[in-house]
Every structure is written in structure tokens, then in C-alpha cells.
């Protein structure tokens, strides 16, 4: 399958984002939360759609020249086909001139995500103990887009 072209998220995506998030993650956000986040300064994102169906998206928040990757999800039916990687590279291509570094937290047990992030250029940089509601630790990672 040829990957769809990444598009920027808009407010009207909120219900679809919530549906995909809820189908995937235990601590999922609802449509109102996505709508609220998308209206905050510095918050943006990218999506992949096919025939109007949302297949994958990422959401980030930028403060000055630093961004945090807030969430990244690919529909379970469409995983391991390069969608997450495509979204990360679309974001980087658009914003690399103004963002110095990207940060994220990921569950220490989430091997697929940690592999994706490591391959993309993220480097482990710390741990947050019992970060998640079920007590699991988070691995902190950073992805430098600009060399000091
Ligand atoms: C993590 C996630 C976003 C990856 O999305 P994806 O579209 O399947 O990822 P890609 O196809 O772009 O994969 C890129 C790389 O990620 C890694 N990867 C993806 N799925 C993997 C799997 N099931 N097992 C191991 N590595 C995997 C591989 O390194 C892969 O590169 P390769 O294809 O050359 O082996 C997806 O599995 C997902 O939505 N998981 C649930 C939500 C989640 O955990 N999000 C991250 C929260 S921080």
C-alpha cells in the first residue's frame, strides 16, 4: 500500500482522534480533550487518512524551540507499514528550522515504540519512576534536530 500524504491536524479531527486513541491506549483522551488541546498555543499535529478514515496521527506541543511529542498512534490494522515513521518525518521536515529538540515519555515496556523512536533518532535521556497510573516507569527520550 502506498502511504497517504501526511496532513496537518485541525479542530474538526478531534472526534476521530479520540476514537483511534480510545481503541489503542488505556489512558485515552476524549474528543473534548483533543479539541481543547488543539486550541492551545504551540499544539499541533499530523495525520494520515485514507478515504476519510484516520489511520495514524501524532500530536505535539512546542514551547519556544522545544517540542514534546504528546501522543502517536497507528490503527492496529495498519501497523508496521511505516506510518508512524512517515508522520515523524513530515513533522521534522516542516519544523526543523525552528525546533531545536523534541522530548517524549514512553512506557518502558513499549518495545515497538522504543524501537521506532531509536531508529528515528531519539536518544534515551532518563527515566521517570512510576510515571503511569499503573505504576510503570517512563523512559525519557530526546531527539535533537539542531546541533548547538
Ligand atoms: C508505536 C506505534 C505508533 C508504531 O506505529 P507504526 O506505524 O506501526 O510504526 P512504523 O510502521 O512506522 O514502524 C517504524 C519502526 O518502528 C518499530 N516497530 C513498529 N512496530 C513494531 C513492532 N510491532 N515490533 C517491533 N518494532 C516495531 C520498528 O523499528 C519499525 O521499523 P521497521 O519497520 O524497519 O522494523 C504503534 O505500534 C502504535 O500505535 N502503538 C500503540 C500506541 C503507542 O504505543 N504509541 C506510542 C506512545 S509513546
Image (cartoon, rainbow, N blue to C red):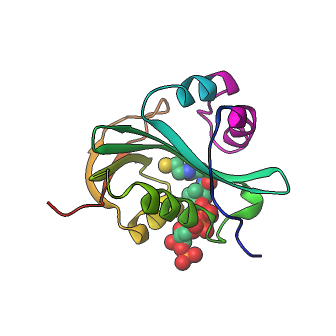
The answer to whether residue 71 is seen in the rendering is yes
- Image quadrant where one finds the C terminus: bottom left
Which residues make up the magenta segment?
Answer: 12-32
Residue, x 48% and y 29% (percent of image)? 133
Main SS type for the magenta part? helix
Q: Is residue 140 above or below residue 136?
A: below
**On the image, which quarter does residue 63 sit in?**
top left
Residue, x 38% and y 47% (percent of image)? 104
- Image quadrant where one finds the N terminus: bottom right
Left or right of residue 100, residue 45 in this image: right
Left or right of residue 38, residue 114 in this image: left
User: Residue 8, position in %: x, y?
Assistant: 60, 48
User: Residue 146, position in %: x, y?
Assistant: 24, 61
Q: Quadrant of ligand 1?
A: bottom right
**On the image, which quarter does residue 132 sit in?**
top left
User: Residue 29, position in %: x, y?
Assistant: 62, 30
Left or right of residue 123, residue 110 in this image: right
Looking at the image, which residue sits at the far right? 51
User: Residue 70, position in %: x, y?
Assistant: 47, 40
Left or right of residue 123, residue 51 in this image: right
Looking at the image, which residue sits at the far left? 148
Residue, x 71% and y 65% (percent of image)? 4
Amino acid at each position: 500500500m502506498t502511504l497517504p500524504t501526511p496532513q496537518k491536524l485541525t479542530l474538526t479531527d478531534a472526534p476521530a482522534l479520540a476514537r483511534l486513541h480510545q481503541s489503542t491506549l488505556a489512558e485515552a483522551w476524549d474528543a473534548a480533550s483533543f479539541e481543547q488541546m488543539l486550541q492551545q498555543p504551540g499544539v499541533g499535529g499530523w495525520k494520515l487518512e485514507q478515504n476519510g478514515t484516520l489511520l495514524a496521527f501524532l500530536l505535539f506541543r512546542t514551547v519556544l524551540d522545544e517540542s514534546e511529542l504528546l501522543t502517536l498512534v497507528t490503527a492496529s490494522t495498519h501497523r508496521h507499514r511505516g506510518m508512524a515513521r512517515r508522520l515523524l518525518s513530515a513533522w521534522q521536515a516542516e519544523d526543523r528550522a525552528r525546533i531545536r529538540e523534541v522530548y517524549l515519555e514512553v512506557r518502558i515496556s513499549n518495545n515497538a515504540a522504543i524501537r521506532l523512536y531509536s531508529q528515528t533518532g531519539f536518544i534515551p535521556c532518563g527515566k521517570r519512576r512510576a510515571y503511569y497510573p499503573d505504576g510503570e516507569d517512563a523512559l525519557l527520550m530526546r531527539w535533537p534536530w539542531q546541533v548547538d
